[in-house]
Amino acid sequence: MELSVLDIKGQDTGKKVVLDDAVFGIEPNDHAIYLDVKRYLAAQRQGTAKSKERSEISGSTRKLGRQKGGGGARRGDINSPLLVGGARVFGPKPRNYSIKLNKKVTALARRSALSYKVQENALVVVEDFTFDAPKTKSFIEVLNNLQLADKKVLVVLPGSDKNVYLSARNLPNAKLAIASDINTYGVLNAGVMVVTEGSIEKIQAVLAK
């Protein structure tokens, strides 16, 4: 499949880029996408929630009431979960929420997400670009030229570019990613992907294996 390459002014350069059908033209696998998005979101969780158990509460261990004859439940000391200010039963403990996923499933999910973007005509290819200095106004101008100012955009660059990153970081609807680091969630979460020419080659080199 071929796509036209635009410049940052939104004009057709006359060049074409060939998309590898093995990466951008497969039959999307929804279950692989579900697993990879689940893995990504689970990895964002801190897992630091913690409540005190009975042995961790500061308080006397003296038995407050007699064992029998009180007419109520046996509750022991003042740290009992039955009392206000007592411990919590089976409360949360620090844990790792990360999920293991095979590399082949992850790659399939990313190819599926990219294929969805192509099917939805939500993938725009532009010439490689950079800015002389960090300037949010310059990045907004590029989005306006591409008629994407009102959309949630993921811009994929072939490598890290400090000036472009600093120009885009204050825009809530614009995200930047490096071609070798794109993930399924980021691709699907964007309304439109803006991919530079150099990034297409790198994406295909990673995912066509």
Image: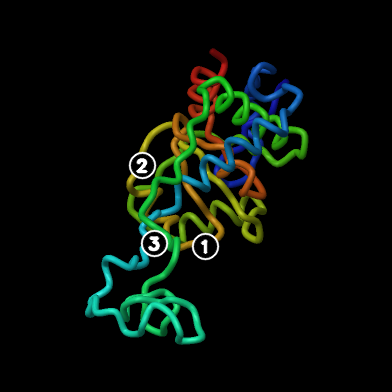
- For label 2, the crowd category at 10 Å Cα-Cα, with few meaning under 14, some 14 to 19 and many 20 or more, is some
Question: Which mark sits nearer the N-terminus, 3 or 1?
Answer: 3
Spatial CA span between label 1 and label 2: 19 Å
Quarter of the figure that contains the C terminus: top right
Q: In the depicted view, which residue is nearer to us: 76 or 52?
A: 76
Question: Which mark sits nearer the N-terminus, 3 or 2?
Answer: 3
116 horizontally vs 203: left or right: right
Q: Nearer the viewer, mark 3 or mark 2?
A: 3
Q: Which mark is residue 132?
A: none
The residue that appears at 48% across and 27% down in the rendered structure is 198
The residue that appears at 49% across and 37% down in the rendered structure is 99
Question: Eyeballing the image, is 57 above or below 145?
Answer: below
Q: Amino acid at mark 2?
A: Asp
Q: Nearer the viewer, mark 1 or mark 2?
A: 1
Q: Amino acid at mark 3?
A: Ala
User: On the image, numbered disc 3 is attached to which residue?
Assistant: 49
The residue that appears at 62% across and 55% down in the rendered structure is 152
Q: In the depicted view, which residue is nearer to us: 176 or 59?
A: 59
User: On the image, numbered disc 1 is attached to which residue?
Assistant: 172
Spatial CA span between label 3 and label 2: 37 Å
User: On the image, numbered disc 2 is attached to which residue?
Assistant: 161
Q: Amino acid at mark 1?
A: Pro
- For label 1, the crowd category at 10 Å Cα-Cα, with few meaning under 14, some 14 to 19 and many 20 or more, is few
Mark 3 falls on what kind of element?
loop
Quarter of the figure that contains the N terminus: top right
Q: Position of residue 182 (x, y in %)?
A: 50, 36
Mark 1 falls on what kind of element?
loop
Mark 2 falls on what kind of element?
loop
Question: Which mark sits nearer the N-terminus, 1 or 2?
Answer: 2
**Quadrant of the rendered structure where residue 125 is?**
top right
